[in-house]
Image (spheres, rainbow, N blue to C red):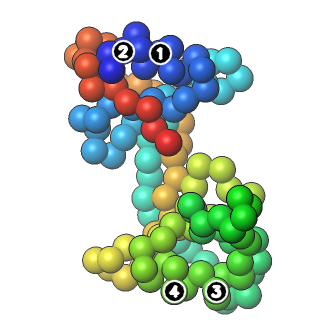
Amino acid sequence: MNFTEAMQQLREGAKVSRRKWTDPTIFKLVDGKVKCFENISQYYVYDESIFLSEGWRILGLEIEGKEVELCFCDLIPHLKSGAKARLSSWEDSYICIDNESKFIVFKSIVECNFREDLESLVAEDWMVIE
């Protein structure tokens, strides 16, 4: 879709980005204003208290239409198989296993300044982000 179509989707509540951006910059409305966000990825820092922590959800896992909350220790097989998980209090963040390093990685989006040029405004590769 083009930029105009992407902005219409944004007005309707969708998050939008471009296919060209492999680590996408995302636009979404926050309090009626367009905000720009970038993905960050870092090792997840935790201590032993996490082992029995509650309130974890596996992204995309629902039973009878409801998200299932698990204890962290019950997440391990899911994370090992490639699932993403978040605490129920997190909105745009999650953890997963980095297959290369075998560490738990925290991924989130942070607000940033838009730094692209005119090419982005005339591009035809805009898309809705789920």
Element marked by disc 3: helix
Q: Amino acid at mark 3?
A: Asp
Q: Are marks 4 and 1 in contact (CB under 8 Å)?
A: no
Residue at image mark 3? 74
Residue 36 x/y as whole percent: 49, 29
Q: Mark 4 vs mark 1: which is more N-terminal? A: 1
Badge 4 amino acid: Pro
Q: Nearer the viewer, residue 2 or 118?
A: 2
Q: Say which residue appears at 28% left-offset and 77% top-offset.
A: 100
Dot 1 amino acid type: Met
Q: Which residue is mark 1?
A: 7
Q: Look at 64% across and 86% down and name the residue there.
A: 74
Q: What residue type is disc 2 on?
A: Phe
Q: Are marks 3 and 4 in contact (CB under 8 Å)?
A: yes
Residue furthest front as drawn = 64
Residue for point 37% across, 73% down? 98
- Residue annotated with mark 4: 77
Q: Residue at x 49, y 58 (%)?
A: 107
Q: Are marks 2 and 1 in contact (CB under 8 Å)?
A: yes
Distance of label 1 from label 3 (alpha carbons): 41 Å
